[in-house]
Amino acid sequence: MLRFALFVTLISSAPAATPALMPLPVTVRPAAGKLTLDNSFKAAVVSAPDARLDEAIGRFVVRLSRQTGIPMPGLKEGAPKLRIECASAGSEYPTLGEDESYTLDVTSERALLNAPTRAGALHGLETFGQLVALGKDGFEVAAVHIEDKPRFPWRGLMLDSARHWMPLEVVRRNLDAMAAVKLNVFHWHLADDQGFRVESKRFPKLQGEGSDGLFYTQAEIRGVVAYARDRGIRVVPEFDIPGHTTAWMVGYPELGTNPGPYEIGRHWGIFENALDPSREETYAFLDAFFEEMTALFPDPYFHIGGDEVEAKQWNASARVQAWAKQNNLKDAHAIQAYFNQRVQKMLTKRGKTLIGWDEVLHPDLPRDIVVQSWRGQKSLAEAAAKGYRGILSWGYYVDHLSPAAFHYGVDPMSGDADRLGPEEKARILGGELCMWAEYTTSETVDSRIWPRGAAIAERLWSPAATVNVDSMYARMEAVSGVLEWTGVQHRANYGPMLERMTGGRPTEALRVLADAVEGLGLGPRARAGKYTSLTPMNRLADAARPESESVRAMELAAAKVAADPKGSPAEAALLRREFARWAANDARFRELAAGSPLLTELLPLSRDLSALGEAGLKLLDGLEKGQAPAAGFVAAQTKEVARMEKPAAELNLAATRPVKALLKGGK
Amino acid sequence: MLRFALFVTLISSAPAATPALMPLPVTVRPAAGKLTLDNSFKAAVVSAPDARLDEAIGRFVVRLSRQTGIPMPGLKEGAPKLRIECASAGSEYPTLGEDESYTLDVTSERALLNAPTRAGALHGLETFGQLVALGKDGFEVAAVHIEDKPRFPWRGLMLDSARHWMPLEVVRRNLDAMAAVKLNVFHWHLADDQGFRVESKRFPKLQGEGSDGLFYTQAEIRGVVAYARDRGIRVVPEFDIPGHTTAWMVGYPELGTNPGPYEIGRHWGIFENALDPSREETYAFLDAFFEEMTALFPDPYFHIGGDEVEAKQWNASARVQAWAKQNNLKDAHAIQAYFNQRVQKMLTKRGKTLIGWDEVLHPDLPRDIVVQSWRGQKSLAEAAAKGYRGILSWGYYVDHLSPAAFHYGVDPMSGDADRLGPEEKARILGGELCMWAEYTTSETVDSRIWPRGAAIAERLWSPAATVNVDSMYARMEAVSGVLEWTGVQHRANYGPMLERMTGGRPTEALRVLADAVEGLGLGPRARAGKYTSLTPMNRLADAARPESESVRAMELAAAKVAADPKGSPAEAALLRREFARWAANDARFRELAAGSPLLTELLPLSRDLSALGEAGLKLLDGLEKGQAPAAGFVAAQTKEVARMEKPAAELNLAATRPVKALLKGGK
């Protein structure tokens, strides 16, 4: 595979020689010349007319116009600069495994996009959009030949709309961003203990009592399904049963194993409530419910969750126990398998294939179900060996706020999966990044998915050998800018959140600190233990990014300066400027914090940041003079850095990393 | 009138003692105590049920929740903290002159909003929203008693959707922002030489040939009218005739005085094309057209433009001249008056009152028409003296990018208007800020309207004696933050536009420059003479704000330091920091500009900015040491500043102003 030439770095201010593509295509062959973009730009299908593709092209040109600031009204005169040949429109809805390949040829005169299906054509448009760069004469696309197709057919994003409500515009803008990085499955987690988010006309108390009024109407659902379809994205709904069902039981307590009454869940974690598997009425309810919901979601896959079912209520219920004995179900796992078999039949008769989390795997279930693994490649490989198809989600939980490099390193086909035979391997369909919403709101969700989601998208699309982490980061940060034009607010919401924390006063001193810290993910926040769905999410822990771009640039610079102090003047200058900024910041931050209760908890972090800035400057001085720092200084600073590495105010002080790199170099 | 205590300044970082209200209410009486906002917050109508008000309250609480980051799901338990008593829902649509008053009482326990109509209740909600501040224990509203009502009944925003297309979301978010500052008329300029923006089913070639496909469907129009109504805003459509009509004639050339063919206008300025007043078919067309459009817009006022009609084609047309002679119409003005009389009758029979620009004023037109004056208070007063009602727009053209203080100083009732008798004065209904769109796009339009539009809103709402400019600026800058939560993007689009100019590289060096310059308005840009609707609007001249907040803060600081060098340490520190930033910026900017053709034109400005920073530092040094600067230095710098005051790259270098203030002080 060709390694893509990349000259974009945060340190160098030289312009990008070639735009950064993500996911990286299978083949990229740069050529001589460039296609200039101006107000005469037009794109058109030159094969058989396809109204839906025409609309997609229309949207694409509008976005290109916004991205460049150039009006592109599609004037009548002149030939289209981007010509699209699409052999077949394909099916009404995107389907698993359809041909998504495309080729794109850009010369100085025109661009030609060729694809066997509309899905491929849509992907090719997105690639063209990422190729647009600011050259010395304006916006342009460098001449190139690209051949591309996905490695895995199932590349998903799971969004939890239950824990925190995600308004329609959040869904829509994330579908646009998904399309931009060639993700093709929107897995919609629509009900959980904390909320039932879909209108049921058959059982109106589901949303009526179980949602605080925050749910999607059926018309809105149909709108989202069409919106996704137009962008080449399948919509797989998830109704998690028999656990995670408290919100169902608020309106229909008779569904529960315990008599109730039930209230909408406000705290997080695994609830004990579960549907009653022993009553036929439960199955009758579900059958009628699926009748309604399978008609609403056209995709042939239907997700029933099935994770984290607590045995406690079933074990404690004399009725359930008597029934289980009668039916020879020896434990909760067997009960759940029985329950799943019943549900699976309801889905099958409506043409749907059941998909569920690891826990649904049971020998009694037919081989055509799909297993989504939060447990890992081992679990996935075991399922594949048994004949089940599967997708990986372990390692793709973006709500953990792990670095992009971690997610990027997780390959669905690695470990036990790598040892499978070819037929078994073919059962591993891909993966899904999971955006659970306990610790995110509609305001922060975009920044938890993007840009790191692009790195996962690359893992699922690009050839397995695409593993260079530095290249990934450089491209991810560039694509983060492109994503902004799709409408996701991973960058846009940062400033207003900081302003809220200062009560509208100038945020600069807060921003310096905010840029140097990173938010903590689900684990540590859950352990903080005080969260409910009513907890304000307006702290720096919420505004802060999962990964600091500016600190990463400093880390790279520090590594270079430590290795070659005299030979890295640009990097040294960058570090000096940033360290000086940190060193001077605490005085200003303290002044700002005096007026805001939302800033008080950050005072120790701010003090530490300034100390790191001072230490960094001292280390730089020594390195530049060729003097090793005093052993005592290094020891003391190393101890300080270790102390600072412990989270505070649910934040990591990322700023420790470049100083640590210099300390190591200075030893 | 009580002058509102205001402790918010850009220089002090002390928290706001009282939140900044804009428009300033008639009476504000602070009291002891505060109402705390937390997740139990609820608002409810306690008088007769009013579904539309309930919806408005629902939206208001959602916004409050976003503004504070506190979930406010409206839990069942607990009484509403904000109680609304509304005596009467009022009419189906907002009407001119209805009672818009309200009183608001906030104590430590609860808030009570009382209004005779829904319109007043909506205004009171917005005031409550502006009262929310971050106190030492969290978000709160300080106890207060407010009595409020508008000075003028017609407080409008005119948006030009013709010159540059304004998508629906631009309209919607600006309606929300209008409501936030109590503007109550959305005057929608829907057709001009460059585009016909409404779907006509009767004459589909109007939008079909005259809009490049960029128009509002009738369903969308109805949606906007309902959206505005729900926010207490009337929608007055404008179809500008008989000039400004090129776009009409692209599809219907027979409407024109000249035979055509016509093309959509691409350049700006006054076109010669005008409807043919001599053919009965023209009137038949308009009659059928108004039949359709008056049904679409329920407001009783209907705007027919009537401005800037060029006589040239009428004078050159033998047919028109013969017809005019026959009808005793001695010149173009008489022809237009005849035309307007015909149109006025078409509107009257459909229950509409004609409104037009100054030019429609003619003794032959009945006294019930309304004149919108772009010429000024003199013209308005003359109309009022003759018995016509009028609104002022001269002085409120926000596309001129004048300082807020200029607009704020324009009172519809000043000058000749002030010398009118009480009955005549009552004919002056208010004013409208005008957002013409030659030099703005959907991306920049919000920053051209806001926050300066809030200052105009205050002029039209608050008592005439509310004239303190410093208070206005301090409150406007605070309200600018509140406006952000309504969804307008006057701040949000700044960063992405700068990123586009750097090709995605870090924008800091550009931002330092961008913060120190101000965009030029219509006049100088029109004189640059090279603009059409196809010109990219992606330069700093487009991204730059009309007025620099940070430079204004520096000007205030410089005035204090110049007057009392020893007694203003905080101000001196602010200036020193900013001047140093400017001085150091050019080197970084030059590096950045090397990679971007969009930055090249800014190089001289950047050099000047650094020179100003250096001069500023030198002046500060002298002032602090109590040494007068050398006369030669002052003379040289004064000359340099004068040179820099000339615009470059269609930008003003606002940074000259604080240096000038120090130079004056240093003399």
Image (spheres, coloured by chain):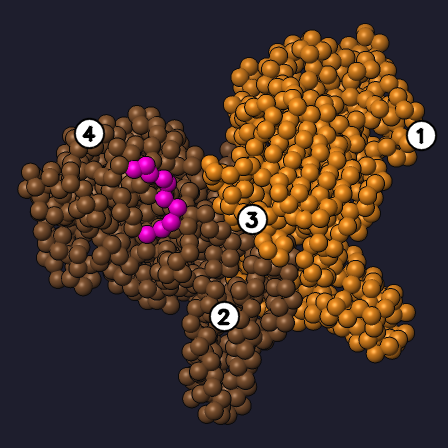
Chain colours: A brown, B orange
Q: Nearer the viewer, residue B294 or B266?
A: B294
Question: Which residue: 71% across, 11% down?
Answer: B348
How far apart, in angstroms, are the residues tagged by discs 3 and 1? 47 Å
C-alpha gap between disc 2 and disc 3 = 37 Å
Residue A11 image label: 2
Q: Is residue B493 left or right of residue B517?
A: left
Q: Secondary structure at mark 2?
A: loop
Please give the chain letter of the residue carrying mark 4: A
Q: Which residue is mark 3?
A: B68
| Mark 2 and mark 4 on one chain | yes
Q: Quadrant of residue B499?
A: bottom right
What amino acid is at disc 2?
A: Ile
Q: Which residues are magenta?
A: A260-269
Name the disc covering residue B419, or none.
1
**From mark 4 to mark 1, how far is it between C-alphas?**
82 Å
* Mark 4 residue crowding within 10 angstroms, few (<14) / some (14–19) / many (20+): few
Which dot, 4 or 1, sits closer to the camera?
Answer: 4
In the rendered image, residue B393 lying in the magenta stretch gets the answer no
